[in-house]
Amino acid sequence: MGKIAHKFAHDLLLSADAELCGVASRDKEKAEEFSIDCSAKKSFGSYEELARDQEIDVVYVATPHPFHFENTMLCLDNNKGVLCEKPIGMNSAQTRKVSAKAQSKGLFLMEGLWTRFIPVTEKLIELLERKVIGEVLFIRADFGFKADLNPDGRIYNKSLGGGSLLDVGIYPIYMSLLVLGVPARIQSMARFTASGVDIYCSMMFDYSNNSKASLESSVEADTPTEAHIYGEKG
């Protein structure tokens, strides 16, 4: 029951088209406290109970990274649509499996990447569609912050999905996919800790139309955290 789950639940209350039917935790007491705080109708002491509840249509998964796959599959197996926090899987194999499962059952499945839906993104798409800067030549994007140097913390723990790529690298990657689509070729380099997680990752996306994207992520330094899109006209 982390901060993001609380923020999502409270924001859901602002929608006239949705109802928070239930919340679940492996700790029943925490689930009950959460349900009171967010005005949920029910609380469950296990994820299985929530997944089996017939009143629930869609489940928001906000557990730690390594559990996203199994939690999402549990919900899909019980015919529930899923909005899962990023990353939706720990690797491409897991992501393909949940995607295939959702498609085979005709269920809603989406990775919870909030930046896709903010007003500035909608404006960006509008400007690109109007060719205000012409054809896109290349993109530079980064996301970096200095994480606490705690070997036992999530960021530095490989088994908990640590590292810069899964934590913040997804944002510059998302920007490139949004603007240019899927690249034809990817080159990457990284700096790794003794625990085996990447604390810095540099990626170059090469596109079939010769556009390029230079992307970076870091959990060892504060970087500008900006995206620059360069086109023929500016």
Image (tube, grey):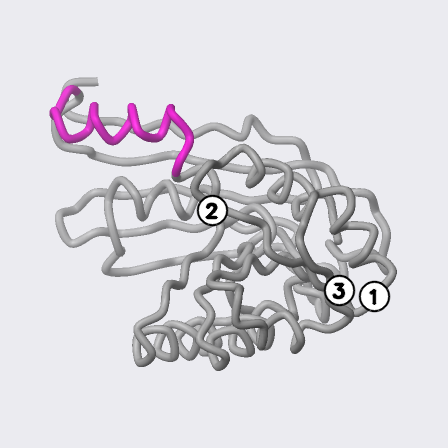
Locate residue 119, reporting x and y percent. 38, 25
The residue that appears at 53% across and 64% down in the rendered structure is: 56
Q: Classify residue 206 as left or right of residue 170.
A: left
* Residue underneath mark 1: 28
Task: Point out the frontmost of discs 2 and 3.
Answer: 3
Q: Is residue 176 magenta?
A: no
The alpha-carbon separation of the residues under discs 1 and 3 comes to: 6 Å
* Rendering quarter of residue 140: top left
- Disc on the earlier residue, 2 or 3: 3
> Taking 192 as reference, is 228 left or right?
left
- Against 92, residue 4 (above or below) is above
Q: Helix or strand or loop: what does disc 3 sit on? A: loop
Instruction: Return the residue nearer the eye: 14 or 182.
Output: 14
* Residue that numbered label 3 is attached to: 25
Residue pointed to by mark 2: 113
As measured in the structure, the alpha-carbon distance from the residue carrying label 2 to the one carrying label 3 is: 22 Å
Range of the magenta residues?
117-132
Q: Quadrant of residue 165?
A: bottom right
Residue mark closest to the camera, 1 vs 3: 1
Q: Is residue 216 left or right of residue 154?
A: left
Magenta span: helix, strand or loop, mainly?
helix
Asked if the residue under mark 3 is in contact with the one under mark 1, i.e. CB atoms within 8 Å, the reply is: yes
> Alpha-carbon distance for marks 1 and 2?
28 Å
Of the residues shown, which amino acid type is indicated by label 3?
Ser
What's the residue at 53%, 55% (across, down)? 86
Question: Which of the marked residues, 1 or 2, is nearer the chain's N terminus?
Answer: 1
Q: Is 7 above or below relative to 195? A: above
Q: Quadrant of the C terminus?
A: top left
In this view, the residue in front, 17 or 68, is 17
Disc 3 residue crowd, few under 14, some 14–19, many 20+, Cα 10 Å: some
- Residue 145 image point, x, y percent: 67, 36
